[in-house]
Structure formats: C-alpha cells, structure tokens
Image (tube, grey):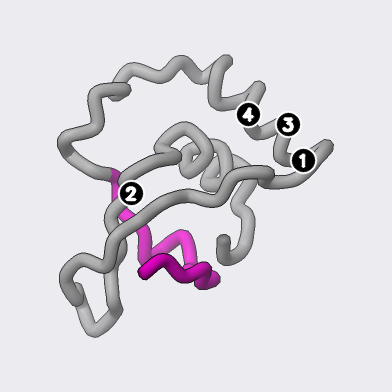
C-alpha cells in the first residue's frame, strides 16, 4: 500500500545503491530553481528503514536529485 507522508529531510538517507552518484552542482541547482519557481511536482519515493538514534529513517528509492535540491534549499518536510 502506498501512502503520502510528510517526512523531515533529516530522517531521509540516500540509497548506497544509487547509480547516479556524480550529479553535477549545476544539475542540482537547476532542479532547486525549478522547485523554487513551481514547487515540488513529484514527491520522493522512500521506504521505511531502520531506527537510528531514536528516529525512524527512510531510504530513497526515487528522487535523489530532488532530495539534493531540497537540501540545498533547506526546505522543510517533504
């Protein structure tokens, strides 16, 4: 079952199996500018992972570049 939840960025971690590890800063900035002007059109897809230091962690399945852009913008929960 799929649900939509607001999750703090600090509770999201990147997937070590992500094949796009060398995203350029320019690509991330372009996505960040898009998020600023029109908003986040596609949410991140994550799965519930382990609990670390007392907080539930989530690992990204899809949306690593959007995650990097949101971190750059220091956006609140997504």
* Dot placed on the residue nearer the N-terminal end, 2 or 1: 1
Q: Alpha carbon of mark 1 to alpha carbon of mark 3: how far?
A: 5 Å
Is residue 2 part of the magenta span, yes or no? yes
* Dot placed on the residue nearer the N-terminal end, 3 or 2: 3
What residue is pinned by disc 2?
60
Q: Residues within 10 Å of mark 3 (few under 14, many from 20)?
A: some
Quadrant into which the N terminus falls: bottom left
* Dot placed on the residue nearer the N-terminal end, 4 or 2: 4
> Pointers 3 and 4 in contact (CB under 8 A)?
yes
Is residue 60 part of the magenta span, yes or no? no
Q: Residues within 10 Å of mark 1 (few under 14, many from 20)?
A: some
The residue lying at 81 percent from left, 39 percent from top is 38
The residue lying at 44 percent from left, 40 percent from top is 63
Task: Please identify the quarter of the rendering in which residue 11 is found.
Answer: bottom left
Q: Is residue 73 above or below residue 8?
A: above
Say which element carries label 2. strand
What residue is pinned by disc 4?
31
Label number found at residue 34: 3
* Dot placed on the residue nearer the N-terminal end, 1 or 4: 4
Label number found at residue 61: none
């Amino acid at each position: 079952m799929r649900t939509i939840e607001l999750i703090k960025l600090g509770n999201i971690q990147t997937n070590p199996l992500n094949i796009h590890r060398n995203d350029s800063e320019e690509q991330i900035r372009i996505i960040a500018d898009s998020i600023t002007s029109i908003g986040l059109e596609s949410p991140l897809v994550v799965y519930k992972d382990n609990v670390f230091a007392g907080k539930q962690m989530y690992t990204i399945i899809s949306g690593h570049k959007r995650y990097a852009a949101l971190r750059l913008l220091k956006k609140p929960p997504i």
